[in-house]
Each structure stands twice: as structure tokens, then as C-alpha cells.
Amino acid sequence: MIEHLYSYDEIDSTNELAKRMRDILKNGDIIWALKQTAGHGKGERIWYSPEGGLWFSIFFRPVTLRDPNIYTKMMAVAIIRVLRKFKIDEIGIKWPNDIYYGKEKVGGILTEIIHHGGKKEIVIGVGLNVNNDTNDIPNATSLKKITGKEFDLSHLLKRIHSEAIGLHNFVTKGQRNIITNLWRNSIVLKKGMKIKLLYPSGTYIGTVVSIFADSLVVERDGIKERVKPSEIEFL
């Protein structure tokens, strides 16, 4: 059950509205929009958000915030666990926060910290391609395209929210390692996998050496180096 759900036909961004509404939002409240006109991802990348997709944000007011990335991992795990219950077995996390089916993107997560009067709050924005058309989006797919079925957005939202709230209990109890282990086991990148490295100097091929909670180590021409999420792509 979702106690506080604020739903809209069209807004600029669920994350931005959550920030504006922070004074009235309670822990676990949701902002949901059928369409976003200014959806964005990390680094202000534009996130195409037409009708048919699932665009929402969940608000949390944590007591302490040692590791804000745990909220991103928590939400990614919640989404993966729910979608696998729909028998979408190949769904996984492309390090660190994108949802992929094979080599195609299904969704993304944007976690933002709100600083207010010495306190810190969290907004987790989620964008999932569900029933919307993704033909004009490079390397993207949707749940409808994967399964051949139309999804009830409200039902899917409730399932993901319920899963996220359950996982949030581990965060509040200081059992972050449980979330991190679940997240690591859901990552589609594996040690030894060859990936494409997109650097300003050119495109290269590297091999995944280690996957950490906050970084990825690859080997290229015998040299090991840490890379950013924006610098990697599947072959």
C-alpha cells in the first residue's frame, strides 16, 4: 500500500517537483507522472519521458547519510527483483545505476541529495521504458517489447515501491552490506568481460578486472585503470 502518492498527468520532472514539495513529503512518498517535459538523468542528460513509461521519484528523510549511493543500489535491486518476478530473467544492472536487458537499456536511476537547514534528504528518480515506443532511442528497449505484453503502470509502481521500502529497512538498520551484495549479484558486467571504453582520445577495448561499489577497474594494453560509468559501453 502506498500511503502518500502524488500523481500527475504531466509535469517537468518528478525529481524537481519532489524537491519543491520537500516540506510536505514524508518518508517513502512518491511523485508519479504519466509524462515528463524536462526529465533528466545524471549530468543533466535529457531523459525522454513520453506517456507509456513509468516516471516517478521516491522521497526519503534519512537520519544519517554516510553513503548516498546505497539508495541508488537499493532502488536498482528493487526494480530487478520485481521484474524478474515477471519472468524477465535477463534483466540486470549495468554498473552502477542503469537497468539493462541484454545490451539494451530499459531504465535509469538518478539519486539526488537535498541539503536543507543542515539536514540531508534523498530523492530517488526512476525512469523505466514500459509501454512506450523506444524505436527512436539508440540501444534502448521497453518491457512491452521484451515481453510482448502491456503493463499496468500503477500495479508495477506499487510492486517496485513495496520492494524498495522492504529493502530500505536494511539501510535504516545499518545492514548496507546486504543491499550491496544483492546489487553486485545483479550487475550484468562480469570480471573478464570485454567492454568498449569511450575516451576523449578515442575508443578502445578493455577487460573488466574488478567491480567495486563506487568504481570499475579495467585493463587496457596491460595497464589497469579506473573508469567512469559514462566511459563504458557494451561491445
Image: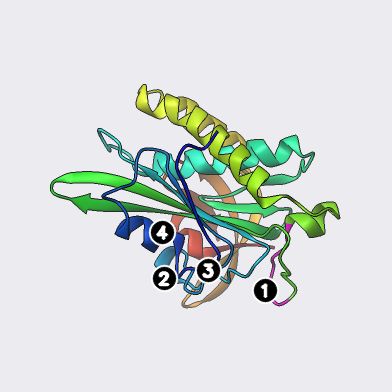
Label 3 CA crowd tier, 10 Å (few <14, some 14–19, many 20+): some
On the picture, is 190 further left or further right than 22? Answer: right
Residue drawn 70% across the image and 46% down it: 91
Q: Amino acid at mark 3?
A: Glu
Look at label 1 and name its amino acid. Answer: Ile
Residue ID for mark 2: 44
Query: What residue do we see at 71% from left, 69% from top?
Result: 134
Q: Position of residue 137 (x, y in %)?
A: 67, 73
* Tag of residue 15: 4
Closer-to-camera residue (176/24): 24
Instruction: Say whether disc 1 or disc 2 marks the residue closer to the N-terminus.
Output: 2
**Element type at mark 3:** loop
Q: Is residue 117 left or right of residue 215?
A: left
Tell me which numbered mark, 3 or 2, is placed earlier along the sequence.
3
Instruction: Give the main secondary structure of the magenta stretch.
Output: loop
Disc 4 element: helix
Which is in the foreground here, disc 4 or disc 2? 4
Amino acid marked by disc 4: Asn
Residue 188 visible in the snapshot: no
